[in-house]
Image (cartoon, rainbow, N blue to C red):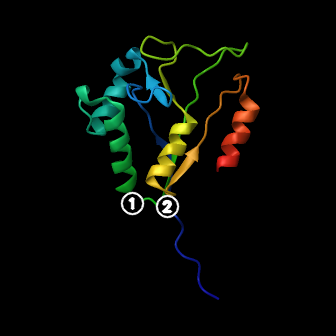
Amino acid sequence: MTAPGPPALVDCHFHVGLRGDRWPEWGGFSDAFLRERAFRVFRRYAGIGPDEVRDEILLARTRETIEGSGMDAVVCLALDPAHREDGTPYPTGPGGEVHMWVATDYVFHLRETIGPRVLVGASVHPYDPRFEPRLRDAAERG
């Protein structure tokens, strides 16, 4: 019998995001969010200049961070836009009421392009009228 290997190192809480300038279907930040102190701290920590908050740069930094992390796997977290109780979504986009959202499809894209080190942290808002089929879809996709 062989001894088990060392436990896998997994970062269970890794936020990802996009500005929404190139891939608006995969996520976005509101203008208000871009002005928040927390976002400015995140941006500086990630080495992203104020004029570099663009999807292509955010994707590149995400890849660099995951690949250089020393982790065996990273759970990348999606964040579905909020919906009202009647099922209608709150507005997203630069002037929207949703200040940050990240599509589960974007996290699946990260897994497809970066590889199996990306574990999908899917997100489906419970008031979305398509909650159950979207949740099933995410589970079936892994």
Count of picture labels: 2
- Contact, CB < 8 Å: mark 2 with mark 1? yes
Name the residue furthest bottom: 1
Judged left or right of residue 48, residue 63 is right
Q: Quadrant of the N terminus?
A: bottom right
Residue 141 versus residue 117: which sits nearer the camera?
141
Q: Mark 2 points at which residue?
A: 9
Q: In this view, does 85 lie above or below 135?
A: above
Checking the image for residue 99, the label placed there is none
Would you place residue 62 above or below residue 83 in this image? below
**What residue is shown at x 52% (from left), y 72% (from top)?**
6
Q: Residues within 10 Å of mark 1 (few under 14, many from 20)?
A: few
The three-letter code of the residue at mark 1 reads: Gly
In the image, taking residue 117 as reference, residue 44 lies left or right, namely left
Residue 70's mark? 1
Residues packed near mark 2 inside 10 Å, few (<14), some (14 to 19) or many (20 plus) = few
The quarter of the displayed image where residue 135 is located: top right
Residue lying at 44% horizontally and 59% vertically, measured from the top left: 71
Q: Position of residue 26 (x, y in %)?
A: 50, 31
At 57% from the left and 37% from the top, the residue drawn is 104
Pick the front one: 13 or 135:
135
Determine the CA span between mark 2 and mark 1: 8 Å
The image quarter containing residue 70 is bottom left
Disc 1 on helix, strand or loop?
loop
Tell me what residue is drawn at x 72 percent, y 29 percent.
131
Give the residue type that dot 2 points to: Leu
Q: Position of residue 23 (x, y in %)?
A: 43, 30
In the rendered view, tell whether residue 121 sits above or below residue 71.
above
Question: With respect to residue 57, does 35 lie above or below?
Answer: above
| Position of residue 106 measured from the top left corner of the image (x, y, whole percent) | 51, 38
Task: Farthest residue to the right: give it.
Answer: 132
